Amino acid sequence: MSIKDVRFGFNFLTDTDIKSCMDSVRDLELTFACLPLSSLRLKSSDSKVLDPSNTVMNPEFCQKWCHCVVAKISQPNVDSEIESTRLENQKSFTQDISWATFLNVYSIMFELPLHGDVVNLVRLLDNQIDIYMNSAVLIQFWALVPIVNLKTDPWKKWTKFISSIRNVNRIKLALEIGTELPNDEELDRWLGEPVAALIIQSKTFLTNKKGYPVLPKPHQVFIKKMFNIGCQIVISGQLGIKQQFNYLGHLYQNTTSLTPYSSDFISGFEDYLQTPLQPLKHNLQSYVYETFEQDPIKYYEYQRAISKALIDKYEDEVIIVYVVGAGRGPLVDATFEAAKESNIKVKISAIEKNENALPSLFLKNKEKWENRVTIINVDMRSWNPSEKCDILVSELLGSFGDNELSPECLDGAQSYLKTDGISIPSSYTSYLGPIQSRKLHAEISSIRNNKDNCNFQKPYVVQLNNVYSIAPPKALFTFVHPKKNVEESNDRSGFLKFNISQDCVLHGFAGYFETVLYKDICLSIVPESFSEGMFSWFPAYFPLVKPIFLNKGEELQINFWRSSSKYKVWYEWCVTKPYQSIIHNIKGEMYFMSL
């Protein structure tokens, strides 16, 4: 799996002195404990009554124990309609936060009220976070939300609460589950929320025929999904059953990734927002080439496609192949392997504009290709070869298919392809799907220099992980090469409609692509048709400035444009149903791809 090792903890329901708590954590081989804040208070000043070694006065607390404690603070009604009660509870609440912060605990947990207003709770939390915002103290909260009572919808209450918080990066979610669970669809919706911990009531465990603790199948499935988003696991209730934690460890070891990306090469990139590459504008760095060249699937499929094309074109004695955007030469390698496999002679030219990649090409040509490759350092759009090629091979696709300007590049290169020549790839189609991801929205919100919400009006590349897919993606734009009419514009406009199966929050759209390399040989990062084992492309992400609450049964429509001018290409997008959003990135003012 590509996720980090899971952290296990225990939730103490009653007061326990800190030394006994830490002894239990050590004996059970856990990493943390959830402990009532009252257990961390100094209840007596009489040293004859109070043993300092059992309290936060123990030197080990400041040295290491504090980082293993989640302090649970009581939840007084800070939104009481009675002013005197509200003010008294407010004072108690802020004092608890102050003490927990002073102790430098790992996190502070409070239970989110599922009934009544939470407006004052929101105000108090934001104010407390603001107090420490510019200090060396890192304050983090867990909002405990039980999903054990199926008569209520805790997700709606959580959504109302977290949507009102300003400092969303400092508040995570702790879900508590019991013997009953909602249906799978409702549970999957939590995958798009910032769940820091999953608390499992000990009574949820069953005993199998051999006398060992196990969980019901629905619980196993949900817990494995929580493992995938990096969730910490807590057992609440009876202490001392180490076998329960051993069982959870076994579940973790047998968890498969929710996303198709399971390679070690992408570990650590989960939900990490990246700016899309612009190879036309910037020369790629060596490590980028190095990473892409290690993809075990992409070049194998390219080799198969080239082999088929060579066989179909084999009439002349030598087949002319141009590799455009050759980089450090992996497609040249694939062409030679395909030619060897097909027993067909080829004449290869490698065209690459990045002069920094040329030494690698020249070295390969000397030591591996036996000087059989003609290497040209030029922009493919301005090259004028003396002869045309039979096969034009390129790897110019981005996470959204056309976002690295493959259409514009291949339009320029088409002039040196014979009229009956073959382009590999021969076509590619972009896809869009609506997603809920409060984590990604919070990450973009935290980026500095967000004038005019500019950071929400540009695409990103991201390995989607902490995400709920609202509906399966649908095809948007298709580009075909070679073009029948080279004068045809690469601008596009279209719209997609999606049916909403349950209440959710729309934060943006995931972008994918699939490409036909040649005939029946394809590559895809669309989840439903993903090329297993491939990691060269993460999905694209098109965020919304303002999240949209969607109701079950509504129809969602997104309108999308690909526009261009003499010097740039850009995307614009907006939601038109059930509500009209702003049009994002008008005229490419916030983001564009340079020609």
Image (cartoon, helix red, strand yellow):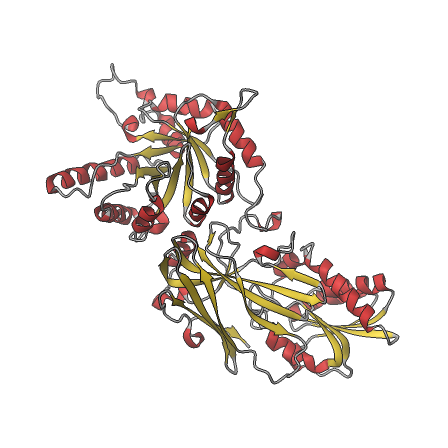
Specify the farthest residue to the top: 48
* Residue 425, x across and y down, in percent: 68, 69
State whether residue 577 is above or below residue 414: above
The N terminus - image quarter: top right
Residue appearing at x 39%, y 55% in the figure: 552
Relative placement, left or right, of 392 versus 251 is right
Residue 197 image-quadrant placement? top left
State whether residue 97 is above or below residue 540: above
* Residue 447, x across and y down, in percent: 40, 59
Q: Nearer the viewer, residue 322 or 540?
A: 540
* Residue 154, x across and y down, in percent: 34, 43
Kindly tell me whether residue 134 is visible in this rendering. Answer: no
Number of callouts: 0
Residue 21 image-quadrant placement? top left
* Residue 305, x across and y down, in percent: 74, 64
Residue appearing at x 37%, y 22% in the figure: 19
Relative placement, left or right, of 489 versus 546 is right
Q: Nearer the viewer, residue 547 or 470?
A: 470
The C terminus - image quarter: bottom right
Kindly tell me whether residue 189 is visible in this rendering. Answer: yes
Specify the farthest residue to the front: 553
Q: Nearer the viewer, residue 356 or 496?
A: 496
Relative placement, left or right, of 490 versus 456 is right
State whether residue 186 is above or below residue 372: above
Residue 358 image-quadrant placement? bottom right
